[in-house]
Image (cartoon, rainbow, N blue to C red):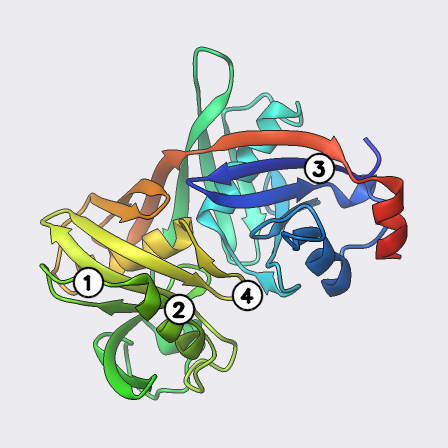
Amino acid sequence: MKNGFFRGHGLGNDYVVMDPKELTFKLTPKTIKAICDRNWGLGSDGILALVPSRKADFGLRIFNPDGSEAEKSGNGLRIFARYLHATGKTKKKHFTVDTKGGVVTITLHVDRHGDASAATVEMGQATFNPTALPCTLDVPELVQQTIEAAGANWTFTGVSVGNPHCVVFKPTGQSWTREELLTLGPVLENHKLFPKRTNVQLAVPTGPKEIFILIWERGAGETQASGSSSCAAASAAVRLGLVTSPVTVKMPGGTLNIEVDPNFGLTMNGPVAEVARGALSQSFVRGLR
């Protein structure tokens, strides 16, 4: 379908999937911003683009709503996998996807209606090495480091799961507010310690195998859920001894299950939903040009 799109979400974190070969325009920062705009476009937390790959069964590029590019997205990968299955681009239930944050393996779980309503993604390995973020701190690992933001000092854990994350924990029994997220999120995202910006999670352990997080995504802002953020926060919580694996990660949009192996290999399992399929109107596309 010319200028077609597939729209889906993972726990309220929504993406538009497109095949650039079917578009009559190029996906540039300008066109991406226009499509993702929630008032003037389709509205989305980002765009997933199907691209060729020599390393995996499929290639994926992930674009944030501000036009920048993300290395990896856990919810995006589940949505992309459902798109591939729903549109007949694959009949496999087990395949690989090449992202800028590494190659991942996906297993689809097809329900009685024939829909791939859930997926398990092997997300790769978490690392606490500052060069993987990147970060300007000259330390062996970004575990329990101090950062000044919004007029206060905070203790954070830096972790990469193919894309960078800054996880800030409060003790069990305390909680984070949305106001704190809206204040701290953009400051930490753009902090000088992270020259390429970072994703932010405000986290608190809520049980021996459970955490709750609020999410501020690099290039997107507040989101209801995030697969890579869940992986980052879960691996940080395990690294700090706050919880043990498997970790149930609760977010405003819902829950993901993250397994963290002894070497910090990460496996994510969660639901995914299709919302709509369609095509951009000719008048909208003319405006993009």
Task: Looking at the image, tell me whether mark 4 or mark 2 is earlier in sequence order.
Answer: 2
Which amino acid type is marked by label 2?
Leu
The image quadrant of residue 22 is top right
| Residue that mark 1 sits on | 239
Which element type, helix, strand or loop, lies under badge 3?
A: strand
Q: Nearer the viewer, mark 2 or mark 3?
A: 2
| Percent coordinates x, y for residue 182 in the rendering | 39, 68
Q: Is residue 201 above or below residue 49?
A: below
160 or 125, which lies in front? 160
Mark 3: give few (<14), some (14-19) or many (20+) Cα within 10 Å: many
Q: CA distance from mark 4 to mark 1?
A: 27 Å
Q: CA distance from mark 1 to mark 2?
A: 26 Å
| Residue that mark 3 sits on | 5
Which amino acid type is marked by label 4?
Gly
Which amino acid type is marked by label 1?
Arg
Relative placement, left or right, of 155 versus 162 is left
Q: Nearer the viewer, mark 4 or mark 2?
A: 2
Mark 2: give few (<14), some (14-19) or many (20+) Cα within 10 Å: some
Residue contact at pointers 4 and 2, CB within 8 angstroms: no
| Residue that mark 2 sits on | 182
Which amino acid type is marked by label 3?
Phe
Q: CA distance from mark 2 to mark 3?
A: 31 Å
| Residue that mark 4 sits on | 219
> Split into 4 quadrants, where in the image is the C terminus?
bottom right
Which element type, helix, strand or loop, lies under badge 4?
A: loop
Query: Which residue does the image show at 81% across and 30% down from the upper left?
Result: 1
Q: CA distance from mark 4 to mark 2?
A: 14 Å
